[in-house]
Image (cartoon, grey):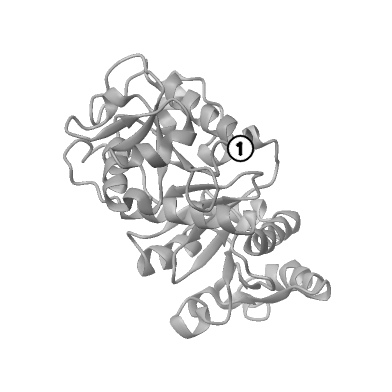
Amino acid sequence: MPPSGLPPVALTCGEPSGVGPEIAVKAWEALGLELPFFWIGDPEHLPEAAKVAVIQDPAETRAAAERGLPVLPNPFARPATPGRPSHENAPGVVEVIDRAVRLVDEGKASAICTAPISKKALADWAGFAHPGHTEYLAHLGGVDDVAMMLAAEELRVVLATIHIPLSRVPEALTPEKLESAIRITRHALQADFGIEAPRIAVAGLNPHAGEDGMLGREEMDWINPLCDMLRGEGMDLTGPLPADTMFHERARAGYDAAVAMYHDQALIPIKTLAFDRGVNVTLGLPFIRTSPDHGTAFDIAGTGQADPTSLIEALRLADAMARTRAGI
């Protein structure tokens, strides 16, 4: 175990034909004993020249990290071909996610960091009936309401709606959904980020936050009353704010996290400020889950070009959140 006494972070392999295997090795090379973590997957899927230390139990992680990337073996059906996912390997990807959740439930891992998956491969070949990682982990965790946060040193932003067409946002963005996102954000800032009295900024849905109803009435009709209600409970909440003026440096100094109404409203600022360093965090789960903020990158898989920075930051954040949750 690390000096803190916490179990190590579990890193799932993700899609083995993507960049996950090579960035896992690069992350170990960068972090070493600074942050021991173990990778769950098939050792045969790792780059040929990688230093690998096979373990049988996560408790062996720290000692193994001195020799190579600690690997908890999870054999797959066949070798992985970079850039070309295999239907035989798709069930193994899901099996690894399941195993990581079991390990954290058993107290053998402090948190889960997930490498990118191919949603299409899992849907086509593994009977995966969930839109993505987030929804599947919510299913495994037995919770209905979760929220997606993108986090970096410069900004934390949470999405009230996620991967839906822009035309569907006004109907999907209900008072109940927004309230849930705000409450989950506040709880996570307290429990996992150690912020005792979180300051949360809420973006408006319409340009200029509706401009008194001239550009849309959602702010006047229900977003403002909802924010007033939550402020009445003692929440430090500002908004709804015009989204075009709430992400510059001076504005960001006034809050600990922002809640955005739709995908691009959140991801454009975080990717502009921290393109390589942003981390995807699922809030509202009974366990900690982070992920690099990128996909499988099939086009460069196996070439050695993949940048591990986002994964390194995701592992660091998972460890920091676990320490905060444990009161360490």
Q: Secondary structure at mark 1?
A: loop
Q: Quadrant of the C terminus?
A: bottom right
Residue 176 or residue 218, whichever sits in front: 176
Quadrant for residue 223, please give it.
Answer: bottom right
Quadrant for residue 130, please give it.
Answer: top right
| Residue 151 located left or right of residue 309 | right
Q: Residue at x 30, y 35 (%)?
A: 21
Q: Residue at x 21, y 32 (%)?
A: 47
Residue with the most extreme bottom position: 250
| Residue 238 located left or right of residue 51 | right
Q: Position of residue 274 (x, y in %)?
A: 37, 65
| Residue 279 located left or right of residue 64 | right
Quadrant for residue 65, please give it.
Answer: top left
Residue 171 or residue 253, whichever sits in front: 253
Amino acid type of disc 1? Gly
Q: Which residue is mark 1?
A: 107
- Callout 1: few (<14), some (14-19), or many (20+) C-alpha neighbours within 10 Å? few
Q: Position of residue 54 (x, y in %)?
A: 35, 28
Q: How many marks?
A: 1
Q: Position of residue 175 (x, y in %)?
A: 74, 59
Q: Position of residue 122 (x, y in %)?
A: 45, 26
| Residue 5 located left or right of residue 153 | right
Viewer can see residue 217: no
Residue 215 or residue 48, whichever sits in front: 48
Viewer can see residue 183: yes
Residue 68 or residue 30, whichever sits in front: 68
